[in-house]
């Protein structure tokens, strides 16, 4: 009887250990499978509550396990993400690739990893509100827009709250100090 109990206990512990290891693997798999989702006509911006599809330009979304937050502009998504309480390691950020989309109606099949994108700031393109960041998968496409319409190409780590609060005209020069002086009255 004691041998049966010991064998059963060992089998149960082995099974629990295997299930625990499988669960760890599933967590990694789920993180890798956090795919973008399409925008729908009734979707509201997570920050401002505006209807997202009512505005031109690229949109953004943050995808986590069991949750998708959608934003009417790339700048709003990045601004939200930069807040310390929103720095989730398991979240994936997506933006439209405007090199493969029409400005007035971005194609949801062209959502790309926001952390790998190139951004053009300082153009006269219209978006939802505030600073317009045009997002691109391809550096050359971003550079072409910047040269054609004015602006500067930035990478995801270059965009901070200072950039998001700049006057778009200051973004063309890329002179952060000039923008600081403009806002401080110098």
Image: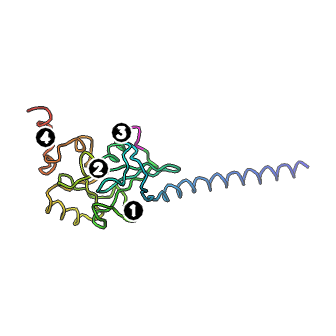
- Specify the segment rendered in magenta: 83-87
Q: First in sequence: mark 4 or mark 1?
A: 1
Residue that label 3 marks: 83
Q: Secondary structure at mark 1?
A: helix
Please rate how many residues cluster around mark 4, counting C-alpha atoms within 10 Å: few if below 14, some from 14 to 19, many from 20. few
Q: How far apart, in angstroms, are the residues tagged by discs 4 and 1?
A: 37 Å
Residue that label 2 marks: 128
Please rate how many residues cluster around mark 1, counting C-alpha atoms within 10 Å: few if below 14, some from 14 to 19, many from 20. some
Q: How far apart, in angstroms, are the residues tagged by discs 2 and 4?
A: 27 Å
Q: Secondary structure at mark 2?
A: loop
Query: Based on the displayed image, in which of its 4 quarters is residue 151 positioned?
Result: bottom left
Residue 131 in the image: state x and y as whole percent: 23, 47
Q: Viewer-nearest of labels 1 and 3? A: 1
Q: How far apart, in angstroms, are the residues tagged by discs 4 and 3?
A: 23 Å
Q: First in sequence: mark 3 or mark 2?
A: 3
- Seen as rendered, the residue at the extreme left is 186
Does the magenta segment cover residue 121? no
Residue that label 1 marks: 108
Does the magenta segment cover residue 86? yes
Please rate how many residues cluster around mark 3, counting C-alpha atoms within 10 Å: few if below 14, some from 14 to 19, many from 20. few
Q: Viewer-nearest of labels 3 and 2? A: 2
Residue that label 4 marks: 177
Residue 10 in the image: state x and y as whole percent: 77, 51
């Amino acid at each position: 009887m004691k041998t049966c109990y010991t064998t059963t206990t060992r089998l149960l512990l082995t099974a629990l250990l295997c299930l625990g290891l499988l669960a760890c693997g599933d967590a990694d798999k789920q993180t890798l499978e956090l795919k973008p989702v399409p925008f729908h006509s009734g979707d509201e911006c997570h920050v401002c509550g505006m209807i997202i599809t009512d505005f031109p330009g690229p949109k953004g979304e943050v995808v986590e396990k069991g949750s998708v937050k959608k934003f009417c502009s790339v700048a709003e998504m990045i601004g939200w993400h930069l807040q310390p309480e929103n720095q989730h390691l398991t979240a994936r950020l997506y933006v439209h690739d405007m090199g493969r989309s029409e400005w007035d109606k971005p194609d949801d099949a062209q959502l790309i990893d926001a952390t790998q994108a190139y951004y053009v700031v300082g153009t006269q393109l219209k978006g939802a509100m505030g600073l317009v960041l045009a997002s691109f998968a391809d550096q050359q496409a971003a550079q072409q827009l910047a040269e054609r319409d004015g602006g500067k190409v930035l990478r995801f780590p270059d965009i901070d709250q200072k950039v998001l609060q700049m006057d778009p005209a200051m973004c063309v020069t890329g002179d952060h100090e000039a923008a600081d002086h403009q806002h401080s009255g110098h």
